[in-house]
Amino acid sequence: MLKTSEGTLDPSDWNAFRLQGHRMLDDMIDYLENLRDQPVWQPMPEEVKHSFQQALDDGQHDLENAYAIFLKNVLPYALGNVHPGFMGWVHGGGSPVGMLAEMLAAGLNANLGGRNQAPIEIERQVVQWVRELFNFPESASGLFVTGTSMANLLGVLIARTARLGASVRHKGLTSDNRQLVAYTSAGAHVSIVQAMDIAGLGSDALRMIPVDSQHQIDIAALELAIAEDKKSGMMPFFVAGTVGTVGVGAIDNLQAIAELCERENIWFHVDGAYGALAMLAPDIAPRLQGIEHADSIAFDFHKWGQVPYDAGFILVRDGELHQNAFASPAAYLRRENRGMAAGSPWPCDFGPDLSRGFRALKTWFTIKVYGAEKLGQVISNTCALAQHMQQRIEAELCLELLAPVALNIACFRYRGIDANRLNADLVVALQESGIAAPSTTTINGQLAIRAAIVNHRTTVSDIDALIDTTLELGSRIAKSIQS
Ligand SMILES: *Cc1c(COP(=O)(O)O)cnc(C)c1O
């Protein structure tokens, strides 16, 4: 039983609490130090799943007991994206410094909606670093959000209000408005589709423009689609280019999109969920040329930036348009020049969230401690590892590369009859092996093993382990399908 002091939630014995806290910290540091001794992932036994179906009050109210459950039933059955062998989806690896920063943030229990406090200045410091990184003007605004899905939604909403004027915020979309239409590539993330849906514009008003052989948006097709929509009396208002498509890691021709949007007076948004931070890597940044012309950029610190979840971000060139899309005066949020209600505008003026956590602190610590250069090296390194993976794939007769490796993602498959089934089974077997964990995608109707290298801990030996295990399990599964 955790004894608490006089009706509060604070412990009556701070020293015992301190010891327990130190044990937890030591255990988590051990865990990170010894990740390689653990499988990437392991299936959760039924009894572990069932252990989370207890009644609201089990009468046990004890920190040590709750922590024992965490150690036994949670820690071993997490997804494993901290592990160097994790290559599924696009997941960040986090970092030891980020973990400590999360603890500090929780201790402060800061609410970053606004008001006059140093945590807000930390968020403003990160906003300033982001402006600098993308060569955006001082007047640009930035906001932490959960992730790029949310940032893409904000991008659509800001572009809508910029186009129709602030009156759309009270009148809504009326029959006077021409139909707003948006454009992105067939390789874009589903969150752009969702953004159009949630914003009330309808996902049918999003044109999925075909991609070329490099999986980049086809600029001529984009131009044609805009011209046709204009001819039909619609109002093109938003183009989303992608840096690092979720399927294969392609980078759209941002310069060409920027010029087209400039000419057509269309909002140019970049979904750079994981790829935009390649600006930190001098060898990759030139391929993002044109991003500095974007009206808004959505990206995640929690992917390539290695900041613990969650830490999404939106940067908006015109901070005033950004604020106009969200600021909502309220009597209880009155601003002052002095006192705790000073320092307007506040983060809550730039998005739908009022109460907000201190995502900025773990990001600030990550950048401050590791430095932009080192973070950029991590990004370059994951791309070099993807090249190594490509070479290994191309050297094996049983393996077939299914898309060019543009950044840090390799898509390939094991050759054989009934290849889609074979490779789906193979990916599950790889995940269950605990050695390496890719995921899947579909490219031109072919099921691909998709390995996205995002984690700073991944090395050449992890890539080799993935390929070697793929060959071993692949041959076994191919035989079982044949027989
Ligand atoms: C991951 C990803 C998203 C979604 O970001 P979340 O942080 O998961 O919300 C959007 N677009 C692309 C290209 C992504 O890779």
Image: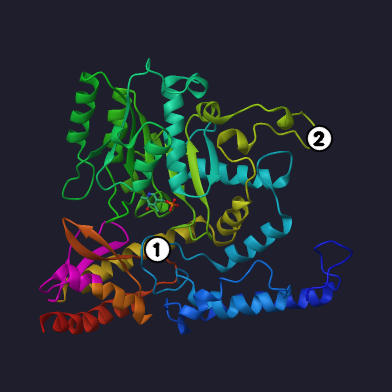
Q: Viewer-proximal residue, 228 or 280?
A: 228
Q: Amino acid at mark 2?
A: Gly
User: Residue 25: where, in percent of width, then height?
Assistant: 66, 74
**Which residue shows up at 63% across the image and 50% down it?**
357
Left or right of 445, for residue 430: right
Q: Dots 2 and 1: beta carbons under 8 Å?
A: no
User: Residue 296: where, in percent of width, then height?
Assistant: 43, 36
User: Which quadrant: the C terminus?
Assistant: bottom left
Find residue 354 and report its image quarter.
top right
User: Residue 326: where, in percent of width, then height?
Assistant: 55, 30
Q: Viewer-proximal residue, 285 or 217?
A: 217
User: Residue 242: where, in percent of width, then height?
Assistant: 33, 45
**Which residue shows up at 38% across the image and 46% down it?**
191
Disc 2 designates what residue? 339
Numbered disc 2: secondary structure: loop
Disc 1 designates what residue? 454
> Does the rendering let one see residue 29?
no
List the single residue furthest toward the front. 55
Q: Is residue 240 above or below residue 160?
A: below
Left or right of 23, for residue 454: left
Measure the C-alpha gap from mark 2 to mark 1: 44 Å
Q: Is residue 182 above or below residue 215?
A: above
